[in-house]
Amino acid sequence: MKPTDDPTVTDPDLYRVVFENDRVRVLEYFDEPGAQTHPHDHPDSVMITLSAFRRRVSLGGEQRDLELPAAQARWVGAQRHSGHNTGETPTHVFFVELKHSTQNPSGTTVLGPS
C-alpha cells in the first residue's frame, strides 16, 4: 500500500490508529450519516462493528450496498474502495489490519496481551 492510499491519510478525520505493532494495525473508523471516504486500500482485515449501519462501498463502476448489525466480527479481504454512509445512523467500527506473518525468534510464547 502506498502511503497516499492509507485511509488515515486519505480520510484522517474518519480513521485513526489506536494500536500498531509489527503484526497488526488497529484502526478506529467513525462517521455520521451522509459521510463519504476517498478511495483507499485495506490489507486483509477483521472488521468489528460497534454500531449497526448501512453503507455503500464502491470502486469504479462496481458498488455494493451493505447493512450490518452491531457487535459483529467479519473478515474483509484486501481491497481498494471508497465508502458512503447511506443510513440514518453513524458508522463505528474497528479494523484489525494484518501485516506479514512473523515468528517469535526465541520460539517462546508470551501469555496474555502485550
Image: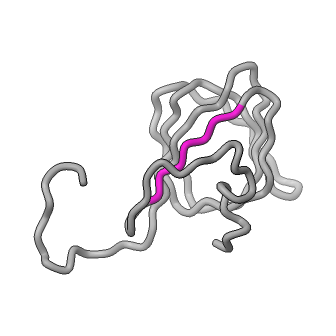
Q: Which residue is rendered at x = 73% and y = 28% of the image?
A: 32
32 to 57, vertically: above or below: above
Q: Quadrant of residue 73?
A: top left
Q: Is residue 40 left or right of residue 1?
A: right
Q: Which residue is rendered at x = 79% and y = 35% of the image?
A: 35
Secondary structure mainly formed by the magenta segment: strand
Looking at the figure, which quarter contains the C terminus?
A: bottom left
36 to 109, vertically: above or below: above
Q: Residue furthest top?
A: 88
Q: Is residue 73 left or right of residue 89?
A: left
Q: Is residue 29 left or right of residue 87?
A: left
114 to 100, vertically: above or below: above
Q: Which residue is rendered at x = 61% and y = 41% of the image?
A: 29
- Report the magenta residues as a range: 25-31
Residue 103 placement (x, y as % from top left) = 25, 75
- In this view, the residue in front, 110 or 78, is 110
